[in-house]
Structure formats: structure tokens, C-alpha cells
Image: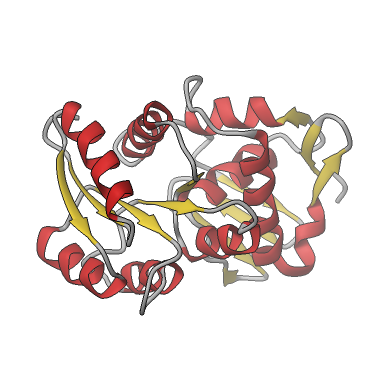
Amino acid sequence: MSKEKILVVDDEEDILELIQYNLSREGINVHCALTGEEALEKALNIIPDLIILDLMLPGIDGLEVTKKIKQNPVTREIPVIMLTAKGEEADVVTGLELGADDYITKPFSPRILIARIKAVLRRHTIPELEINSDSIKINNITIHSGMRSVLINDEPVDLTYSQFQILAYLAARPGWVFTRSQIVDAVHGDDYPVTERSIDTQIVGIRKKLGSYGKYIETVRGVGYKFRDEK
């Protein structure tokens, strides 16, 4: 990670200093921004390898920053890790739907943050889930791993990287029940420090985007999730 450029956005200077200190120790080139407006400007000028973004910002908030970054063809491929406060679950779901890759709740361990950064960067450079390149077709849902596309009744569904990986993993084995930890291991790698709750959040986002077809992802109480195998 010694050559990575990371943009850190937070209106609390002590948080910026904490993150900058710990990332710099890892040899990372750190750039900082205190506002959403400054973040958008620096994202375009620097084109960082990753953005750590606080959701609660003065002026343009973190969700709007995420939306603008993902809408701009110059910056839309930049991965985003959201910094959130407890009780912001609705904002987390919105952020993931807008294209953010992960989130971490304040207060956080610098070691956990660095591990999350490494995992996200690795996911954006190394394919971690190999599924048959042929299309998966279940009822009116078509999932094509090679093209990374999802169609419902021939209409495209816009999923984030993680959402697509989870959906493709479940749909490749309809009827099989997978624990949250199995999904994490398959989608993000064995050492990805994600919580079970974040998998639940991703599932909520996938179901919402699939609309009425979201019912095909079933919760198996006390175990995990499965994709319905009925025709």
C-alpha cells in the first residue's frame, strides 16, 4: 500500500489528524478535506485510490458527496468507505445504494480502519469471487458474471460491486443456505473484517433494488440467507 493515495474527509480536525497519522505510518500518501465541497474538488484534482468520507459534513453532506462522486465518470470508480455515527443505519443503507463500498462506525480502531482500507483496495484490483461466466437465469432474473450485469425482465438493475458479488454468489447455488460468515469469506476474502450486520445491510439494499424480486433472497432465521430455488 506504500504508493496509495487516500483522501480523508471529516470536519473534525482531531479525527483527520488521527487517521492521517496512522495511514502515514503505513506509507500511504494522505490528503485531507474538511468539507464536502473541498472533498469534491480534491477528488477531481488528485484522483485518489480511495476516499474515507464522514457522512455528517457541513454544507454538502457525505451522502451528497458520494452521489456526485459516483455520477462523475472521472471519479465514479474510486472506492468510498463511509465514517458513520451510531444510529445512522438508514444513512448507511443509502450510502451503500449510492455506491459506497463499506462503512465503519465511530469511534473506531485505527487497525480496523487500515484493515478495511486494504480489503477494499484489494477488491478493486483482484477478482475475489469466480462464478461461471455463463448467465444465471432464474425466472425473469438474469445475472451475467462476466459482464457484471443484472437484468430483470430485460431491464438493467444498478448494483454496487459488493451487492453484485453477494447476489451472484447466492443465485449461483439456489436453495443452498449460506451463513453470513460464508458470504463474507466468498465475497471479500477470509481476512475481511466485516461484521454480520453489514451483510444484513447489503442484503437490504439488494432487495430494495430488485423490487418485487427481492423476495427471492430469503432470510433463514438463525443461519443466514439463501436464494429461492423455485421456478
Q: Quadrant of the N terminus?
A: top left
Residue 54 x/y as whole percent = 40, 58
In this view, the residue in front, 119 or 226, is 119
**Looking at the image, which residue is at 77% across and 62% down?**
213
Q: Residue furthest top?
A: 190
**Looking at the image, which residue is at 67% across and 40% down?**
197
Figure quadrant of residue 118: top left
In this orientation, does residue 164 appear? yes
Q: In this rendering, would 38 be left or right of 66?
A: left
In this view, the residue in front, 30 or 14, is 14
Residue 83 x/y as whole percent = 44, 51
Q: In this rendering, would 67 be left or right of 200?
A: left
Q: In this rendering, would 65 be left or right of 45?
A: right
Figure quadrant of residue 38: bottom left
**Looking at the image, which residue is at 26% across and 70% down?**
73
In this view, the residue in front, 148 or 95, is 95
Residue 82 x/y as whole percent = 44, 53
Above or below residue 204? Residue 227 is above
Residue 101 x/y as whole percent = 44, 49
Above or below residue 208? Residue 111 is above
Q: Residue furthest bottom?
A: 59
In this orientation, does residue 144 appear? no
